[in-house]
Amino acid sequence: MRWSGAFWTPTRNMKAARAPERGAPRRVDVDIQRASKARGLPTNAQMRRWLAHAIGRFRSEASLTVRIVDAVEGAELNARWRGRQGPTNVLSFPVSGLEAVAPGLLGDIVLCEPVLKAEAAAQRKTIAAHCAHLLVHGALHLLGYDHERPRPARVMEGLETELLAEFDFPDPYAERD
């Protein structure tokens, strides 16, 4: 799968995903592109496992791309797609209009490695815990969840907390001393 913004749409008008039938086989394909020369991030296998678990709760089959970028590319993408200056931690680009051709294609998640590491340090979290959180957060956006209003934000944050707890990661929204 190639990384392309040709069919990206914002998450605001999407409906949240529904869970697949109980016991249905799950296949989540994750292509990981490391465009940043970053070291010290979780392995591709770890990231695939976290995403497969999170997405597998809602879809029996799915595919997506995760691209790990440096600050320059992160800032360029944030400016182009959100109109904001500087890099951000995570961007999600859901695919729309390709259901007939690629029914399981969810879209792309972009992680900005230096922002991820700086936030993890500032929040006194492990890089793995923060990376898992950002991936789950991005995946939920691809599935149609958002946090623009209070009620959907509570739902999304609850799902994030629950999914991360299943990997023994702490609540990402809990206050730290």
Image: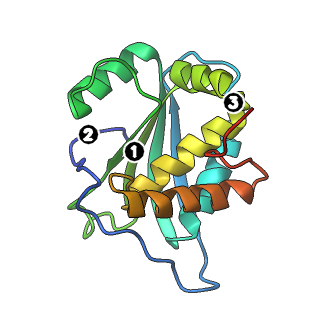
Characterize the local packing of mark 1: few (<14), some (14-19) or many (20 or more) Cα atoms within 10 angstroms. many
The residue furthest front is 177
Q: Position of residue 170 (x, y in %)?
A: 74, 47
Give the side of residue 166 with respect to residue 106, left or right: right
Residue at 57% from the left image edge and 70% from the top image edge: 57
- Counting residues from the start of the chain, the first of labels 1 and 3 encountered is 1
Q: Can I make out residue 20 in this image?
A: yes
Rendered image quadrant of residue 47: top right
Q: Residue 127 — which label?
A: 3
Mark 3 and mark 1 in contact (Cβ < 8 Å)?
A: no
User: Label 2 is placed on what type of residue?
Assistant: Gly
Q: Nearer the viewer, residue 63 or 79?
A: 79
Mark 1 and mark 2 in contact (Cβ < 8 Å)?
A: yes
Q: CA distance from mark 1 to mark 3?
A: 21 Å
Q: Nearer the viewer, residue 176 or 17?
A: 176
Q: CA distance from mark 3 to mark 2?
A: 27 Å
Q: Position of residue 176 (x, y in %)?
A: 71, 35
Q: Is residue 77 above or below residue 95?
A: above
Characterize the local packing of mark 2: few (<14), some (14-19) or many (20 or more) Cα atoms within 10 angstroms. few
Residue of label 2? 5
Q: Is residue 66 above or below residue 15?
A: above
Rendered image quadrant of residue 84: top left
Look at discs 1 and 3 and give the one toward the viewer: 3
Residue of label 1? 108
Question: How is colour applied across the structure in the image?
Answer: rainbow
